[in-house]
């Protein structure tokens, strides 16, 4: 199983239940944002996209989302 996660700069990553994180494409179901505004929340919610607020670097944010979605993954592997 995998989940597509987007960054505000347009990059999309696939997070897999095996702990692998790789670049991907498509419409993300989770969006990582640095600052959450009412407008962003309404926009993403209207498209059915979940929002994850993170102020760390890209890899750390992706790792945090991976651990929230797939708590059984103890380590991440960036591919």
Image (tube, rainbow, N blue to C red):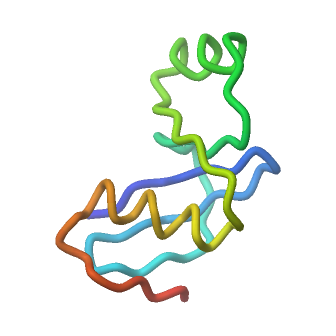
Answer left or right for 53 relative to 35.
left
Residue 51: x and y in percent read 52, 34
Give the residue at x 25% y 76%.
73
Q: Is residue 51 above or below residue 28?
A: above
Q: Nearer the viewer, residue 9 or 36?
A: 36
Side of 49 where 66 appears, left or right: left
**Would you place residue 75 above or below residue 29 in this image?**
below
- Residue 16 placement, left or right of 37: left
Q: Nearer the viewer, residue 11 or 66?
A: 66
Q: How many marks?
A: 0
Is 53 on the left or on the right of 16, as rendered? right
Q: Position of residue 59 (x, y in %)?
A: 62, 73
- Identify which residue, 10 or 52, lies in the foreground: 52
Q: Residue 18, located in which quarter of the rendered image?
A: bottom left
In the image, residue 78 above or below residue 17: below
Residue 64, by quadrant, is bottom left
Residue lying farthest to the front in this orientation: 55
Location of residue 75 (image quadrant): bottom left
Q: Residue at x 54, y 12 (%)?
A: 46
Q: Observer-nearest residue: 22 or 68?
A: 68
Measured as percent of width and height from the top left, residue 78 is found at 53, 86
Quadrant of the drawing holding the C terminus: bottom right
Q: Is residue 5 above or below residue 37?
A: below
Image position, residue 68 (x, y; %): 32, 55
Q: Name, please, the residue furthest toward the right.
A: 9
């Amino acid at each position: 199983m995998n989940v597509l996660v987007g960054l505000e700069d347009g990059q999309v990553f696939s997070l897999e239940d095996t702990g692998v994180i790789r670049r991907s494409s498509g419409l993300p179901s989770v969006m990582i944002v640095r600052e959450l505004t009412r407008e962003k929340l309404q926009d993403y919610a209207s498209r059915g996209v979940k929002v994850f607020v993170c102020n760390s670097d890209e890899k750390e944010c992706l790792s945090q989302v991976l651990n929230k979605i797939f708590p059984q993954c103890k380590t991440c592997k960036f591919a």
